[in-house]
Image (spheres, helix red, strand yellow):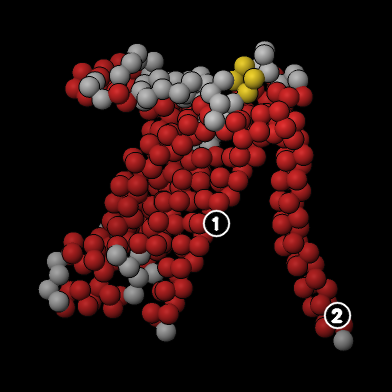
Amino acid sequence: MKTRFVDSGFKKAVTLLALSVAVLTCLLVYNMAANAVPAMQKFGPAFLFTSTWDPVKEIFGALPFIYGTIVSSALALLIAVPVSLGIAVYLAELAPLYIRQPLNFLIELLAAIPSVVYGLWGIFVLAPFLRDIAQPFLSNYLGFLPVFKGEFYGVGMLTAGIILSIMIIPTISSISREVFLTVPFTQREAASALGATRWETIRLAVLGYAKPGVMGAVILGLGRALGETMAVTMVIGNRPEISASLFAPSYTMASVIANEFIEATSNLYLSALIEVGLILFFVTLLINIAARALIWKVLSKAKIANI
């Protein structure tokens, strides 16, 4: 009887703890939405499509921050995805054991580095390199493209994209590697038996089978890039303008909240910043839900194949 009572109490306790996470999330959304009401009432849907951000005149539009967030995250994915998939394929399929373990440890170590350290490295190492070498080179040879025109500041969209790509490589590569390891070995054997080369086996039997899981890993990396604050704030330039050039300074939703929240002296200013945070919350939430759904799909396929 005593054991049954203890088990029942333990079950109720852990259930309460699990439900508390959902309750806290709902309270967070409610509190943010309630504080964002003044900005919602004054600006309405135009808040998402207005480029003016003027705290003095109390005119607020989130479009430059949405643009900066999307472009910097997309640039990070463009750089990080090929590198991450290459790392994952090598670790899962090609690397000998004596290299696999140390290399896997070093890659996971990148995820443990504080974002402020990435930001400092970006300011003192990456930004000067881009300003003095990389950006003049790109301007000279690819300057006919709008994305490679403009002044060389060092800090800007390109710097933020590179920093973000380095930060999300551990996430994408680690999850992709685990997804590759869930591919049944019979897939590889079947491809080899049909005369496929090592590359063809990896491309057709492994990458083709694990595509949903890889997409989930990429979307999780995107979620990390969208929400990154400190490192991006230190290197993106923090200018609320929309520019086609990757050399130009920009702003993200997370950066404007971190930079200006302490300076919000009016209720409308504070409400506008909270509405930006609410937009970022929902975007990140939707992206993470999509990523989890894709990963569950590939894992369920692996379980069925193993049965």
The residue wearing badge 1 is: 289
Percent position of residue 52, x then y: 56, 20
* Residue kind at label 1, given as amino acid type: Ile
Answer whether residue 128 is visible to the viewer in this image. no
Kindly identify the residue that appears in the image at 83 percent across and 73 percent down. 9
Q: Is residue 244 left or right of residue 142?
A: right
The quarter of the rendered structure image containing the N terminus is: bottom right
Kindly identify the residue that appears in the image at 66 percent across and 33 percent down. 44
The quarter of the rendered structure image containing the C terminus is: bottom left
Percent position of residue 143, x then y: 24, 20
Return the residue found at the far bottom. Answer: 1
Disc ID at residue 153: none
Residue 180 drawn above or below residue 252: below
Question: Could you tell me which secondary element the residue under label 2 belongs to?
Answer: helix
Percent position of residue 179, x then y: 40, 63
Kindly identify the residue that appears in the image at 38 percent across and 79 percent down. 305
Nearer the observer, 136 or 2: 136
* Residue kind at label 2, given as amino acid type: Phe
Residue 70 drawn above or below residue 53: below
Kindly identify the residue that appears in the image at 58 percent across and 50 percent down. 285
- From the viewer's perspective, is the residue at label 1 or at label 2 nearer? 1
The residue wearing badge 2 is: 5
Q: Is residue 3 left or right of residue 229?
A: right
Residue 146 drawn above or below residue 1: above
Q: Is residue 155 left or right of residue 202?
A: right
| Classed neighbour count for the residue bearing mark 2: other residues with Cα under 10 Å, few (<14), some (14–19), many (≥20) | few
The answer to which image quadrant residue 266 occupies is: top right
